[in-house]
Image (spheres, rainbow, N blue to C red):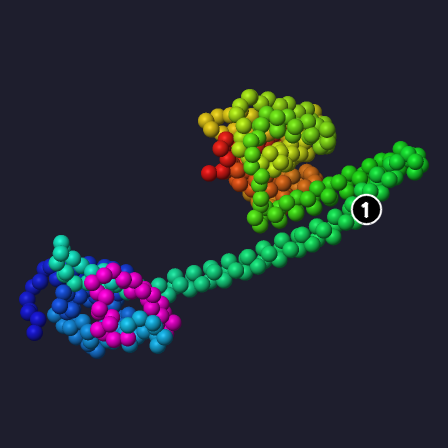
Amino acid sequence: MPSEGPHPDRDRLQAVLEALPAGALMQGPADEVLTVNQQFVRMFDLAGRVDLSPGAPVRPVARLVRAFFAPDHTGPHTAGGILAGRHVHRTAEITLPDGRTIRREVEPLRHEDTYLGALWVFHDISERKRRDHDLERDNLALTELARQRNAFTAAASHELRTPLTSVISFCELLTDPSVGTLGTEQRSFLDAIRRNADRMQQVIADLLLATRMRAAPELEFGPVDVPGMLQDAVLEHMTRGDGTGAFTVLDCAPGPALHGDRHRLQHVLANLLENAAKFTPPDGLITVTAAPRRGFWEIEVADTGIGVPEEFREEIFTGFVRAPNAHTGGYPGTGLGLAISRTVVKLHGGTLTAGGTEGEGAAFRIRLPLAGPS
């Protein structure tokens, strides 16, 4: 019979076990019960079915606990087998017939070289397992939706590109003097057709690039002469006209080469310059500044256009999202350019952020590490 009377240490131990958010049993060195908490008793419906008092043998308890396991459980089937591994730390996930999942942890207790027993802890992780399963299903569904979206985008872009190529080719054919002389009004109509066909072709190119970026984009890294790249981007922008006629200024300090994909980075700059021109009035100013600072190249494309509302300065980098003042102003665009640009910059280990003041102008800042992505 266990001794009666006050046991302050045992009471403190019992209080500690009752405070645990899991079922717990403490076993002594002779495979006897030291104490259990009520959550353990309720978890395996042990009340009145087995002796759980201090000093009682653990084997009958282990036998009843094992009876709760699902029939296909692959662990030990006998109380002796269960207790055999008590001298080493063990963890196992156990499925119960009622659908619950229990994580069992066995922690041997030692003082120096003396074995003092083991602490058995049983966590009910059913809810966590359910959430993990639901999350896995959602991830699989989203992956399939992304695959279908990319497939649709690629197919639709291909189908649109073929007739657009014909439209542009006929525009070029009609402007050939050998076909005949065009009147002023006819030429203006033809220019409008060509301009909108080119814009549609750019939208298709952005859609295809966005699809590739979502998949596994391949970058070709090498040394990039940043001042030369910026000069080429600004000259190309001025050659295209890009719409408004706003004055463009480039101010770039000399600096070391950057490890990156020049072609992709120049595409980013083209997107930012095109946006600046689109949202800036003809008498406005576009400024491109760049300088190396503390192991990074910092590049800013600023304008004196409509600006970006502060609450949309992060959202505009999501595909197909545009700020309200861009919608209400009737400015064309899909909202893909900034999303693609940020992806490219991130793949270089850098950042792309938006600033400025709404109504006074926008400022897009690129920060790229000289060494490329880590």
Q: Is residue 13 left or right of residue 325?
A: left
Which residue is label 1 attached to?
166
Relative height, residue 198 to residue 43 (above, below): above
Q: Where in the figure is residue 347, as x and y percent of width and height?
A: 53, 41
Please provide the residue range marked out in magenta.
Answer: 77-105
| SS label for mark 1 | helix
Q: Observer-nearest residue: 83 or 241? A: 83
Q: Which of 332 and 24 is in front in this view?
A: 24
Q: Give the residue at x 8% y 62%.
A: 7
- Look at 74% across and 50% down and name the residue there: 160
> Is 102 colored magenta in this rendering?
yes
Q: Can residue 272 be seen in this view?
A: no
In percent of width and height, residue 86 lies at 21, 65
Residue 159 lies in the magenta stretch:
no
- Write down the quadrant of residue 145 in the picture: bottom right
Disc 1 marks which amino acid? Ser
Q: With respect to residue 139, does 356 lie above or below? A: above
The total of numbered circles placed on residues is: 1
Return the x and y of residue 199 as percentages of the image width and height. Answer: 73, 41
> How far across and how far down the image is residue 194, in percent?
80, 39
